[in-house]
């Protein structure tokens, strides 16, 4: 599996975040075509908090500069991940140094908001140190270098990135391949870190599935890098591109010869590692309890789908009543590839925004959101629909992007071609996906942080998958009543998927189910396509074990808090004010979010005349 800290950074970059109210200005951060937005001036306490965050941010950025560069931190565009000797030990030392500085700041800080932010950052530092120690104790360090290099180059080579920053992509690639002064090829470093730990037989080897995935995707990543250089006309890259092609071929040959034959078939994690994964994403209940709650949710949602399916069938002229057959019939009417974006942009997203405004769900930004289809290499790196955030630092109008893959390159058919999805490219499938990834889901959540001046501690360091994904699933539920009948059925189908995730992820990792049985639940009961089901199973077992349960758990926490708030306020409850307040809090974990609602929102609403 991927090392925990890298996995955390990737998860963060693939769902969210944006905040312009940072201390430093980004080097060349101006977007080619910045979008108009109304950004609130950051309060003084936010500026103070962001100043105090810099040592911890630097401790992270020195070891994962691609991550720092993606979010706009200056000075890291030409740098690459530190896979040098003792990198884990060196990063822990840097994190402890940042932690000591924060502890000193806490002793003298008087502002309660800043003190809360310092506490958030201290917890973040502790978790990163704990994760690093678990990596060294339990895992043999295996790196999918093709994915790392592609994502590092793509972080710079985007439409909204200033051309001056795009030019740094060549310097970064030269560092990846060892052509820059003082650099060593990243493939060599990754191999050295793996081989130096082989002498410890207690370390967990990578899974056969993840190694096979890396092998299948290697050529796709190499081609994706070349396409990015061609699209953005990065000149002078022939030597570096030739070098990365050859080095990835050599690395692939080494994986086939030395890594794959010794890879493990059992994908289960050691109990303490899986427990840390759950804690890291924000699940604070026992996995057995999560399974029980998810099983109940699965059954109730499936029953609701079965009640709705005959109504959808009658409205659409479908000769079936079972929800599975109704969904399969809806999926048969696939949109053409050339019309998918147009359908989302021209039909689904405008109607959702109209309904959000008409029903006073939440306040919206006064500009259109960005949505696009994923490239082949992007789909290999992240085969599920996702949201890419805007820069955190020095944002001058860049927007996050709702990205829709059309297939899973790691799930190829007998002809070797990438297997296509049918899960999001039909009319009924667009509504709840757009609500989740777009508005009022992730896009609104992260746009709000950009435009409302949320501190770095409450965006980056308080990041918690339970809270992030919980909001997006809650946003789906807010919009279900205003969607077409067939869209409502698919909204329930995707809620069924989140319940399936919350029971299957822990069951697979605790040895309570096998991959084949879990796959049948996803394809037969949830009615996912085979390639979509495969990326789900890969997520549970090696891409991000533990994370999949965060959707259901986060949603349940927000819904429970909503009910508590409605009971406390009665007729004074204002849905739009409540939802706006949640967005104003950034990415606070559930307990802290509930505390803010109880101590700030409810008293303020009661005081209104």
Image (cartoon, rainbow, N blue to C red):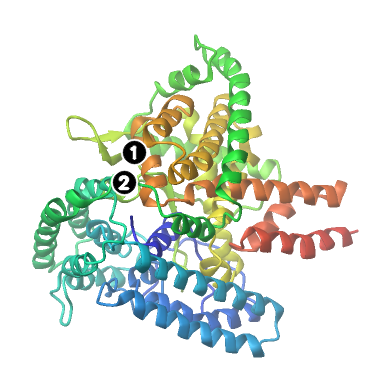
Answer few, some or many: residues within 10 Å of disc 2's Cα (few below 14, many 20 plus, some between 14 and 19).
Answer: many
Q: Residue furthest top?
A: 319
Front position in the image: 16 or 184:
184
Q: Are marks 1 and 2 in contact (CB under 8 Å)?
A: yes
| Residue 406 numbered tag | 1
Residue in the picture at 50% in, 12% down? 318
Front position in the image: 582 or 534:
534
Q: Name the residue tied to disc 2.
A: 379
Q: Measured from the top left, where is residue 41 in percent x and y?
A: 61, 74
The answer to which quarter of the image holds residue 26 is bottom left
In the rendered structure, which disc, 1 or 2, sits on the residue that comes first in sequence?
2
Provide the secondary structure element on which disc 2 rests.
helix
The answer to which quarter of the image holds residue 421 is top left
| Residue 374 numbered tag | none
For residue 366, say whether it is visible.
no
Q: Is residue 359 left or right of residue 260?
A: right
For residue 29, say whether it is visible.
yes
Answer few, some or many: residues within 10 Å of disc 1's Cα (few below 14, many 20 plus, some between 14 and 19).
Answer: many
Which quadrant is home to the C terminus? Answer: bottom right
Q: Measured from the top left, where is residue 269 in percent x and y?
A: 40, 52
Provide the secondary structure element on which disc 1 rests.
loop
Residue in the picture at 33% in, 61% down? 139
The answer to which quarter of the image holds residue 156 is bottom left
Q: Measured from the top left, where is residue 373 in percent x and y?
A: 35, 44
Q: Is residue 505 above or below residue 449?
A: above
Q: Is residue 240 above or below residue 402?
A: below
């Amino acid at each position: 599996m991927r090392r925990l800290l890298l996995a955390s950074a990737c998860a963060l970059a693939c769902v969210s975040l944006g905040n312009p109210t940072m201390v430093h200005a980004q080097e060349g951060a101006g977007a080619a075509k910045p979008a108009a937005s109304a950004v609130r001036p950051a309060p003084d306490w936010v500026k103070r908090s962001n100043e105090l965050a810099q040592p911890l941010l630097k401790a992270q950025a020195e070891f994962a500069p691609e991550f720092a560069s993606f979010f706009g931190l200056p000075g890291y565009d030409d740098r690459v991940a530190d896979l040098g000797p003792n990198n884990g030990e060196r990063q822990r030392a840097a994190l402890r140094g940042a932690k000591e500085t924060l502890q000193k700041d806490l002793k003298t800080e008087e502002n309660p908001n800043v003190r809360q932010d310092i506490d958030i950052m201290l917890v973040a530092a502790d978790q990163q140190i704990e994760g690093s120690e678990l990596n060294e104790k339990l895992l043999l360090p295996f790196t999918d270098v093709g994915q790392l290099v592609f994502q590092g180059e793509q972080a710079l080579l985007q439409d909204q990135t200033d051309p001056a920053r795009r030019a740094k992509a060549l310097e970064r690639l030269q560092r990846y391949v060892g052509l820059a002064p003082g650099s060593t090829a990243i493939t060599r470093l990754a191999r050295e870190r793996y081989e130096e730990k082989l002498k410890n037989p207690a370390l967990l080897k990578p899974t056969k599935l993840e190694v096979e995935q890396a092998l299948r995707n290697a050529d796709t990543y190499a081609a994706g890098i070349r396409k990015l250089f061609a699209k953005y006309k990065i000149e002078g890259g022939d030597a570096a591109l030739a070098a990365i092609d050859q080095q990835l071929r050599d690395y692939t040959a080494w994986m086939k010869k030395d890594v794959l034959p010794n890879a493990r078939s059992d994908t289960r994690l050691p109990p303490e590692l899986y427990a840390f994964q759950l804690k890291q994403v924000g699940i604070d209940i026992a996995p057995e309890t999560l399974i029980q709650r998810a099983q109940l949710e699965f059954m109730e949602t499936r029953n609701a789908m079965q009640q709705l399916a005959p109504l959808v069938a009658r409205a659409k002229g479908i000769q079936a009543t079972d929800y599975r057959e109704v969904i399969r019939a809806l999926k048969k009417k696939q949109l053409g590839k050339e019309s998918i974006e147009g359908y989302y942009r021209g039909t689904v997203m405008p109607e959702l925004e109209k309904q959000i405004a008409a029903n006073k769900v939440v306040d919206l930004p006064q500009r259109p959101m960005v949505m696009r289809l994923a490239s082949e290499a992007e789909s290999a790196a992240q085969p599920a629909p996702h949201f890419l955030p805007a820069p955190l630092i020095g944002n001058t109008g860049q927007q996050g992007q709702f990205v829709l893959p059309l297939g899973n390159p790691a799930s190829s058919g007998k002809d070797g071609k990438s297997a296509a999805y049918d899960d999001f490219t039909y009319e009924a499938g667009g509504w709840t996906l757009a609500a989740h990834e777009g508005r009022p889901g992730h896009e609104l959540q992260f746009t709000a942080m950009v435009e409302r001046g949320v501190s770095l501690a409450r965006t980056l360091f308080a990041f918690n998958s339970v809270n992030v994904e919980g909001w997006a699933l809650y946003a789906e539920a807010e919009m279900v009543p205003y969607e077409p009948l067939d869209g409502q059925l698919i909204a329930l189908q995707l809620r069924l998927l989140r319940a399936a995730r919350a029971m299957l992820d822990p069951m697979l990792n605790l040895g309570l189910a096998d991959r084949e049985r879990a796959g049948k639940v996803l394809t037969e009961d949830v009615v996912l396509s085979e390639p979509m089901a495969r990326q789900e199973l890969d997520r549970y077992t090696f891409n991000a074990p533990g994370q999949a349960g965060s959707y259901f758990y986060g949603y349940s926490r927000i819904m429970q808090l909503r009910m508590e708030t409605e009971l406390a306020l009665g007729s004074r409850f204002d849905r739009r004010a409540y939802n706006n307040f949640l967005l104003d809090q950034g990415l606070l974990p559930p307990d802290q979010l509930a505390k803010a609602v109880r101590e700030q929102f409810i008293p303020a609403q009661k005081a209104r005349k």
